[in-house]
């Protein structure tokens, strides 16, 4: 490491960190105030972490109190799965020199069951596992980090069974119930409107409409009222001789 650039955060701008850099021959500089574009790589990485953390919390339905566990899981996924564009390698492969097995990765926030290894006194017919929520991976050992719903505490364990499809199935079931509810409501409204139309009294025809209908019948039979009205209102045009019409 030759040079470092960071903002004016107190975790970097202090004498202990500056002495450490001077002791190891690391050059450092600070970015200008209120100019995050000078630290574009770091700011872009922070944005990636925030987007992934927000997406994982929303998709899992967990409260925002678990943001730290979601952020740690995001860092673990990025270091093991995201490939650098130029080197075509993951950060874990660059640091360890070998590829990481990712078969142990699970869906964040999914339902799981953690085995009770005899820590609590149990009877013969008591359940041997507790329902929990998957919160990530342990940073100190090869174990999973889960939130036990019975004890309301976070614990690390290897004996965990996952139900990763439960959340997706529940969401699909909720969507189907919502669509069925909309269809039933539409059908009920349609039936009510048809029932009201049947109950509404028939509108009696007006005298004018009956007169018109009678006129149409007379017109078909030969003596039409319409023709007599037309004859009364017709205009009489003057008659000109042919020689006067051309003058």
Image (cartoon, rainbow, N blue to C red):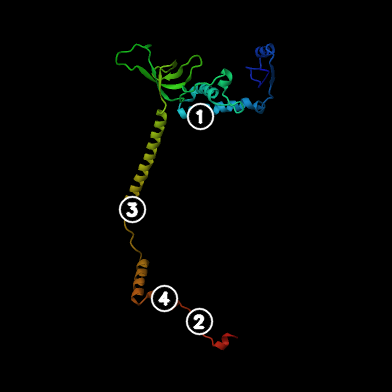
The numbered dot on residue 197 is 3
Callouts 4 and 1 close, C-beta under 8 Å: no
Rounded to the nearest whole Å, what is the CA distance between mark 4 and mark 3? Answer: 39 Å
> Outermost residue, left direction?
125
Establish if 35 lies above or below 193. above
Q: Please provide percent x and percent y for residue 78.
A: 54, 24
Residue 75 numbered mark, or none: none
Dot 2 lies on which element? loop
In screen coordinates, is 92 left or right of 117?
right
Q: Give the CA distance from mark 1 to mark 2.
A: 86 Å
In the picture, residue 87 is in which quadrant?
top right
Residue position marked by numbered label 4 in the rendering? 229
Q: Earlier in the sequence, mark 2 or mark 3?
A: 3
Q: Residue at x 56, y 21 (%)?
A: 93
Mark 1 element type:
helix
Tell whether label 2 touches label 1 (CB within 8 Å).
no
Residue at the spot 35% in from the left edge and 45% down from the top edge: 187
Residue indicated by mark 2: 237
Specify few, some or many for label 3: CA neighbours under 10 Å numbering under 14, 14-19, or 20 or more. Answer: few
State which mark lies toward you, 1 or 2. 1
- Label 1 vs label 3, nearer the camera: 1
Mark in the foreground, 4 or 1: 1
What residue did someone put label 1 on? 55
Which residue is at 40% across, 76% downward?
Answer: 227
Few, some or many C-alpha atoms within 10 Å of disc 1 (few <14, some 14-19, many ≥20)?
few
């Amino acid at each position: 490491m030759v040079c470092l650039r960071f903002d004016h955060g107190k975790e970097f701008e202090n004498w202990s960190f500056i002495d450490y850099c001077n002791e190891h021959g690391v050059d450092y500089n600070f970015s200008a105030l209120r100019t995050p574009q000078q630290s574009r790589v770091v700011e872009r990485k922070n944005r990636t972490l925030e987007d992934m953390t927000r997406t994982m919390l929303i998709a899992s339905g967990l409260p925002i109190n678990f943001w730290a566990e979601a952020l740690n899981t995001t860092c673990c996924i990025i270091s093991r799965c995201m490939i650098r564009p130029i080197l075509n390698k993951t950060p874990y492969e660059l640091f360890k020199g070998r590829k990481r097995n990712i078969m142990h990765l699970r869906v964040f926030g999914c339902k799981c069951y953690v085995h009770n290894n005899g820590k609590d006194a149990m009877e013969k017919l008591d359940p041997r596992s507790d329902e929990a929520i998957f919160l990530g991976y342990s940073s100190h050992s090869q174990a999973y980090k889960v939130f036990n719903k019975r004890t309301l505490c976070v614990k690390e364990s290897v004996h965990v069974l996952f139900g990763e499809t439960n959340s997706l199935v529940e969401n699909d079931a909720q969507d189907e119930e919502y669509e069925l509810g909309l269809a039933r409501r539409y059908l009920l409204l349609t039936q009510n409107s048809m029932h009201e139309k049947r109950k509404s009294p028939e509108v009696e025809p007006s005298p004018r409409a009956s007169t018109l209908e009678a006129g149409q019948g007379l017109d078909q039979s030969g003596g039409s009222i319409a023709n007599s009205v037309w004859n009364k209102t017709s205009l009489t045009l003057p008659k000109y001789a042919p020689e006067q019409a051309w003058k």
